[in-house]
Image (cartoon, helix red, strand yellow):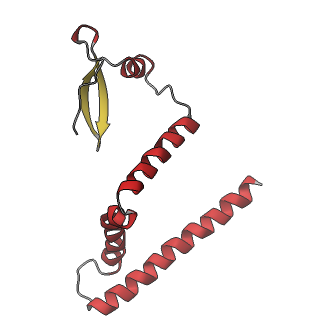
Amino acid sequence: MIVRTPKCFDPEVAVTCNVRVNNVVKVVVASCPTWRRLEQHGRSSLTPAERSLRARIGAYSLHATHDPRETTEPARHAFIATFEAQVDPLGELPEPERLRRAEAARKAYFTRLALRSVKARRRSR
């Protein structure tokens, strides 16, 4: 994790913030008023709607500069690999059979999600 010193850094009023990255807590020293507010209150001053808009801006900015298929390719391959490992954990099946079974496992996964979605919508009525 790279921590940049904010422009408003003043060592006399610096505070430390604990930041969790991959279940590892790292200490960040900051003096930015926003960071100080986060440290004092232990939460963001943004509403959930504002956080959502902020994340959407970031996603649109990323997709404006990079091809979304390229940025998500490693994640897609890892997701598909989980199904291959599920159906053939020892790697003993021939490639076409492993891919066929992995595709069936993927379809079963998404069908289970659809069923859970239907049940959740039914409960919320």
Compared across the picture, whether 113 is left or right of 68 comes to right
The residue under the point 41% across, 49% down is 61
Question: Is 53 above or below relative to 87?
Answer: above
x, y percent for residue 28:
25, 26
Nearest to the observer: residue 22 or residue 60: 60
Nearest to the observer: residue 8 or residue 29: 8
Nearest to the observer: residue 28 or residue 11: 11
The quadrant of the picture occupied by the C terminus is bottom right
x, y percent for residue 92:
23, 87
The quadrant of the picture occupied by the N terminus is top left
Question: Is 26 above or below relative to 15?
Answer: below
Nearest to the observer: residue 52 or residue 6: 6
x, y percent for residue 80:
36, 73
The residue under the point 60% across, 69% down is 114
Compared across the picture, whether 72 is left or right of 49 comes to left
Question: Is 39 above or below relative to 48?
Answer: above
Instruction: State how many labels appear.
Output: 0
The residue under the point 27% across, 89% down is 95
Compared across the picture, whether 48 is left or right of 71 comes to right
Question: Is 34 above or below relative to 2?
Answer: above
x, y percent for residue 9:
26, 17
